[in-house]
Amino acid sequence: MTPEKLKAIISQGEGTEVELKESKDSLARKVYESICAFLNRRGGHVVLGVDNDRNVVGINPSIVQEQLDQLAKDMNNPQLFKPTYYLNFEPMDLDGKKVIYFYVPESTQGHSYKGVFYDRNQDGDFELRSTEQIANLFIRKSKLKTEDRVYPMLGMKDLDEEAFDELRRGIRIENSQHPWLNLSNEEIIRSAELLAVDPETGKEGLTLAAILLFGNSHAITTALPAYRIDLLCRVNNTELYDDRELLSCNLLKAYPIMMAFIKKHLPEQPYIEGIQRFSLRDTILREVVLNMIIHREYSSAYPTTFTIYRDTIVTENWNIPYVYGHIDLQTMRPHRKNPKIAKVFSQMGIVEELGSGMRKMFKYTPLYANGKEPVIEEQDVYRIEIPYIPTLQGSDIDTTQKTTQKTTQKTTQKILEQIKLNPYISREELAEVCGVTTDGIKYNIRKLRESGVIKRVGPDKGGHWEVVEK
């Protein structure tokens, strides 16, 4: 480390990766909390002999060696640090004064100081008090991601054929020559590395990523009994809700339902960029939905929520944070937390390069929200706020809701009529006859099935619909 480089570090002031301590006449004991926090987070620079205002106050020359010896001794004391960690402490002259500099790298293990685990954010060091926080630390340190957890008791029989249909449909739109289109379901699972050997039992089984992407209700309940995605519209009724979708299905089926919910309740805003015309709403909120799906920490029972308010959309999901605090284009550090899940969505052309989703949010939200920017906070709970300008207010909303209800009723009636005429009619054929999107047909059919108006006779693939006469 040169004096010039050290001055540049000091000039940044304290932050996520810089800690300054006076230590003029005695070693600042809290420096160990910072060392522990840096080991547990992303590493950082520590300078002793500099105050919080970035002034070089220096260390008493007569005790510099004493502090160096004490640091080396304490870092190798298992009664203080578990596990112990070797650091290289460097005495330096800066502006005619003595300082001690050392760099703490990010460790591959979780460390505690005096039995307490510490982590780092922009405000400094903080204790990890809850079992959940400590567990997340070790999950983050583990080479085995949560999505790679193996379930030997679950196999191909526990997967949902419709999810594979959804995947192939998306791939075909993006690339009709994609090699996965000619593979069997099991070959797709193996190609996507979603089958693995459990290191404890030595048996092969589905990974959590496979279950989340393709699992039937039994598989998902077995692996993640608390898994839910809660979609809420609270434009008028903010205490309860105007509309709600509570999803516990696999992600390939959940994604189009989430997008249909968005299209149902949020205003459209077409936009032309160059010669391309697209929907600002869909472009922004597709990235928000994918962020919820791909970056969620699925080991937690914390519910994932997507809530539409009168002028803001708010999403929350449990997270293993890599950057604590406010995230923008300068502070973001793209990190794909579930790369296997992301890989499958990328085959359909939905997921692009790492970090592009956040850049789209910041680029297009001001156009959708009259200059307002998104707000992203990364803590244990990852929170996104997307502002928008409602196109309708007051009585106009009530009128629009009534119109929407009438339209939905007409679509429902057409679906029932067509099923009676042709029980084997496909969703695509229904969409063409009814003049709505395939997502809209899926939404209406699911509602009809849940309310017992129609039922499926035979398997989902090869069976037919039947209207239940009451």
Image: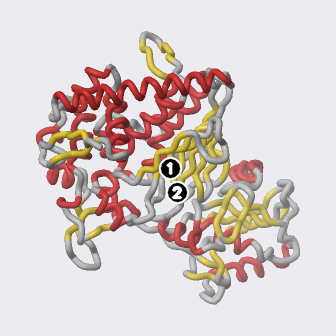
Q: Which quadrant of the structure image shows residue 416?
A: top left
Q: Are marks 1 and 2 in contact (CB under 8 Å)?
A: yes
Query: Along the horizontal axis of the image, is 457 left or right of 333?
Result: left
Q: Nearer the viewer, residue 12 or 340?
A: 340
Return the x and y of residue 377 as percentages of the image width and height.
64, 48
Please tell me which residue is depicted at 82% across the width and 78% down the height of the picture. 63
The correct choice, above or below, for 319 with respect to 126 in the image is: above
Is 84 above or below relative to 52?
Answer: below
Residue reaching furthest to the front? 470
Q: Quadrant of the C terminus?
A: top left
Q: Which residue is mark 1?
A: 230
**Would you identify the image quadrant in which residue 371 lies?**
top right
Q: Residue at x 59, y 59 (%)?
A: 380
- Amino acid type at image mark 2: Pro
Kind of residue at badge 1: Asp
Could one spot residue 29 in this view of the protein? yes
User: Could you tell me residue 181's position as x and y percent?
Assistant: 16, 38
Looking at the image, residue 82 sits to the left or right of residue 213; the answer is right
Q: Earlier in the sequence, mark 1 or mark 2?
A: 1
296 left or right of 5 in image: left
- Dot 2 corresponds to which residue? 303
Please tell me which residue is depicted at 54% across the width and 29% down the height of the picture: 266
- Element type at marker 1? strand
Residue 366 seen in the figure: no
Dot 2: within a 10 Å radius of its alpha carbon, few (fewer than 14), some, or many (20 or more) residues?
some
Identify the image's colour scheme: rainbow, by chain, secondary structure or one colour. Answer: secondary structure
